[in-house]
Image (tube, grey):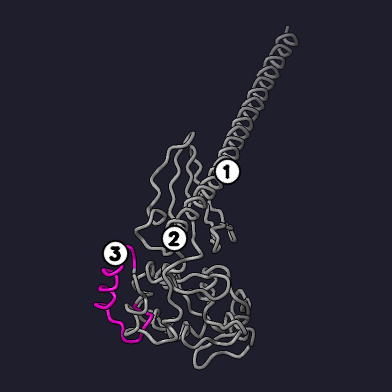
Amino acid sequence: MKNRALNRGVALITAMLITALATVVAANLAWDNALDIRRTTVQLSYEQAKQVGFGAENWVATILRQDLEDSDTDNLQEIWAVQLPGLPIDGGELTGSITDLQGRFNINNLLTPDGKVDEPSKLQFQRLLQSLGLDPEIAGLAIDWLDQDLEPSFPKGAEDSIYTSLVPAYRTANQRICNVTELGALQGMTAEQMALLSPHVTALPGRTAINVNTATPAVLQSLGENISVPDVERLLVDRENGGFVDVKTAFSTLVTPEVLNSLDTSTSYFQLKVVVRIGTVHFTLYSLLQRGPMGNITPILRSFGTT
């Protein structure tokens, strides 16, 4: 009798253990399955958002081509400069904006095509830094980052001898840059300084002119040594209705002949920012678009972001 009772107790405990193990296994399988479904859903939403972003890029290319057919100049009153409204898409929304990058100072203009320092551009960059309340010596640091020699600029330059002593160590680019975020690696550059500088600078291939119809107020002030804040305010008012009619008339008394020759009223480089939300997925596409003289649009640099 005692043996039978003991056997029944062991059997009961064994059955309970098997049931518990089966429950744990089933719960783990259900959890893994839920994670797989969630992961697949997010991945599908991400790929869908990416394709929507590429579609928006093609749509914007059409807008920029049509803009070139309609006008020889580019200004902030044209349709491309309007913030794209929130457009409903399957399962979410699309928003975006287009920025004229030639309304900013091109960091790569600091060097001439043969790799030497372009003095008018250096002076302009120093004025831009001063107008933003930043140290003008950052211009020398940027030149050292771009040029191919290893001789620091006087008096506050920095080359490999400085950067390789940091932790972690790194070296200068010694070539033209493709993204202004590289300036964050300059000696002493802080996140706060980059936040002030970034809206007014860009990194474009080769030398580019500044479009005075879209230039930021700080960039306009940097064009000439004696351009004051009231001068900038007047220029902003003068360009409100379709931009400047005659650049020479508007700027000849404010800038040097060298700077005057670097001003324009049209643009070849635009940046598209598209934000796509599908479900819980937020996808951001940054696309650098080059518009050729015949209206052909070429994406020359893309970067993606998700949150």
Pointers 1 and 3 in contact (CB under 8 A)?
Answer: no
**Residue 51, image x and y in percent?**
57, 43
Which label's residue is closer to the chain start, 2 or 1? 1
Which label's residue is closer to the chain start, 1 or 3? 1
Mark pair 2, 3: CA separation: 17 Å
Q: Which residue is mark 1?
A: 51
Indicate left or right for 234 with 84 as reference: left
Which label's residue is closer to the chain start, 2 or 3? 2
Residue at 53%, 58% (x, y): give it.
295
Mark pair 1, 3: CA separation: 36 Å
Q: Which residue is mark 2?
A: 99
Question: Does dot 1 land on a helix, a strand or a loop?
Answer: helix
Q: Report which quarter residue 116 is drawn in.
A: bottom right
Q: Amino acid at mark 2?
A: Thr
Choose between 95 and 195: the one closer to the eye: 95
Q: Report which quarter residue 233 is drawn in.
A: bottom left
Indicate left or right for 39 with 280 as reference: right
Q: Which residue is mark 3?
A: 240
For the N terminus, the quadrant is: top right
